[in-house]
Amino acid sequence: MGEELISIIVPVYNAEQYLGDCIKSVLKQTYTHFELILVEDGSTDNSREICRRVGMDDIRISLVRQERNQGVSRARNAGIEAAKGKYLFFLDSDDTIHPRLIETLYKIMEKEGAAIATEFYCYDGEKMEGAPGEKRSENLDGYLCLDNQTVMEEFMNGTRGGFTGIGGKMLRRDALDSVRFDENLICGEDTKFIYQLLANGLDALVLNEDWYYYRRHEACASKKNTVREWKSRYESLRYICDQEKEYGREKNVLRWENYIIKCMIDWERESRQSKDSEKREYLRDLAHRETEFPAFSAVSKDYQRSFRLLFTCYPLYVIDRRITDLFRRKERIREEKKQKEQRQRWERQKMLLELRRLQQENEAADRIRKERAKNREKDIEEATIEEAAEEKKVYHEKISVIIPMYNTESYIRQCIRSLRNQTYDNIEIIVVDDGSTDKGAAICRELKGYDDRIQLIVQENKGVSAARNAGLEIATGKYVFFLDSDDAIHPLLFEELIRQAEEFEADIALCEYEKQHAIWMERVLKELSVKDIRPVWQIVEQEESEEWIHMKYASALMRVGALVNRELVGELRFDEDLIYGEDTLFMYRLVCKGVRIAYSDKAWYYYRMHTESVTHSMDVMKDKRYFNIYRILRDGEAEREHKNFAMTWERRLVWLMRQKYMLMKQNKDEEGCRLIRGQALSEKEHPLFQELTMMPKLLFLCCFSCYPLYYFVLEKPAKDLDKFVWAIKSRHAS
């Protein structure tokens, strides 16, 4: 069974300051089969423009527009009507979620068959007090399964804040039936909505993590206290109270009636402080109606007294409250004193027990030390011998290092120095001078006088492929390693590569590479040390090496900084007809043989970035053969009926064509633009191009048919949006 579509509904109203963070948190989800529905509720700021821009960048994002502001309830209902997913997830535009939240809620709902799933809030990035730290269940999966009766009790008691708001809830769509948000309410609408769902007899799941990040700020609706909002909140609470009365659950009726009275007391005190006549008039009418309800006579006596005094004689209420606070303060002080004395007694008892335990442990340790004293030296000696035997495990297989060189006199000395500094010394250094016109060959002859491991081959300029092939012909080592003449390596690299290749019988051992600017390379190499932490390796077996190298670490195909078994190379050579990507094709053909790979993400190969590099040459990019490597790899995988791999190289090809075309445009190179455009027109007729997703095809066709439209409508706004979002994030972080 495939993954189900999840609809994430976000009502948006004047949220430009936080909307970027909200959308990013959704796009970072580990569960990718979702639709993000942005319901724009007549915003007066830049929120609508932000929604429009992000919708162009991701086909999973859709925009529902409301020309005028109709409230959050109407916006959520519009999102529900537009949703197509099996599950609905509600998220406010000023909040964010953990990258794993959607995936986790989906999996547990599918596993348990529940209709509602929720988790705990985290306010302003701070953990909600008592939420994740409490032990709630022995469930090893990290969630609770609650039946409807338990959920309703949790809701009524208010012990779980996760059930009071709609944020962070995932609902099964068929469970909604005809339940919708009350559009007449502007506050408390989510509480009423959830109550209606629970009243239908639904079970629920509670995730034991606070992965919904609720943002508190001055513009938040919960911080506003207008008469309209009080009316909405009261109607929501009264609806729940009346429904519970119909169901005959008097205990819940009394609990909610107490809560209503408490809210009205707080509202009245606030209205008196603000001296708002409209609020006071509304509350007086409301208080008169409230005292006529039968449930009012059953609320606590303290609430009744405070309520009547507050709305009849405010000075008496103030006096009564002060007297009550005084007695409560004295009682609290008395209780705190009692608890302090109890804690002191416990601490003294705990200290005595700890001292007794330590005494017993010391006595036992003394006995053990006396028993082992006679054999200590012998044990140490035996352990030392075993460690020494383990450390003496050394390998002596020869490594042939092949260095093609063409006009790199500025860097060749540094390159060879990094080889001579290797802790592994059984190497031969084969430098192939490909017809250089500088002093590179003379430098190599000078270095050869100091190190007899260096060999120099001089040939006419035939290209880097021919130079590497010439080195392969005379290589005598068990392993070969290709190093460009302007790059360098870490002193421990060969020692680590040979150890992994021999211990795990790997055909290829490689590590990551690090790009360094030419002016910083010298300083970087001086700071390297043989005491650096050794890398962590992973082994990729033969049956999974091809998929691994394509789908996860395709960048490894883009370089030749790898230790390769020469027996595996055999008669394979670099393609001398290619002017770019010959190393990629070589590694690709090696991997296709079925190899075992030892890989580390430690960056111990240092790639030098400078404008003299072949990959930076504009003349090379204008050559018709520049893109051939991607066509060869694509067609090769298509012939082997590996469609996924073929599509990978097709996507790389169309992306690279766009990037190089933009570079030619920026440099105003009309000839280069004409040549690349001609190749692009032929590329769009390829069958695999027709199978690309809509966005890559749209960007490709727009780039080469109408470049101004592509740059100013698609490329530049996307970059500007990224800058805008990151600016907001940085400002918020500061």
Image (cartoon, rainbow, N blue to C red):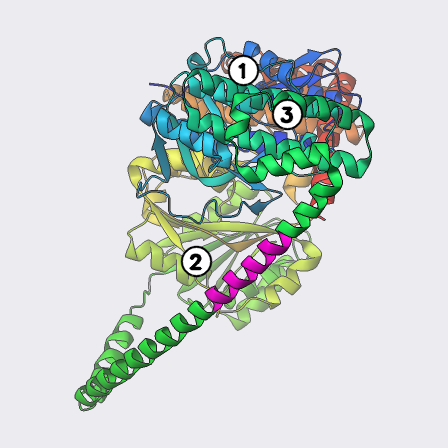
Q: Nearer the viewer, residue 222 or 555?
A: 222
Q: Earlier in the sequence, mark 1 or mark 3?
A: 3
Residue on which the image places disc 1:
689
Q: Is residue 433 left or right of residue 149?
A: right
What secondary structure is marked by label 2?
Answer: loop
Residue 250 magenta-highlighted: no
Q: Earlier in the sequence, mark 2 or mark 1?
A: 2
Residue on which the image places disc 3:
657
On the image, the x and y values in percent for residue 384 come to 27, 80
Q: Nearer the viewer, residue 663 or 421?
A: 663
Q: Is residue 491 above or below residue 506?
A: below
Q: Which residues are magenta?
A: 325-340
- Kind of residue indicated by mark 1: Phe
Does the CB distance between marks 1 and 3 fall below 8 Å?
A: no
**The quarter of the displayed image where residue 76 is located:** top right
Is residue 573 visible in the rendered structure shown here? yes
Residue on which the image places disc 2:
535
Q: Nearer the viewer, residue 110 or 712?
A: 110
What secondary structure is marked by label 1?
Answer: helix
What secondary structure is marked by label 3?
Answer: helix
Q: Residues within 10 Å of mark 2 (few under 14, many from 20)?
A: some
Q: CA distance from mark 2 to mark 1?
A: 40 Å
- Kind of residue indicated by mark 3: Met
Q: Earlier in the sequence, mark 2 or mark 3?
A: 2
Q: Is residue 412 above or below residue 230?
A: below
Instruction: From the image, give the main secondary structure of the stretch colored magenta.
Output: helix
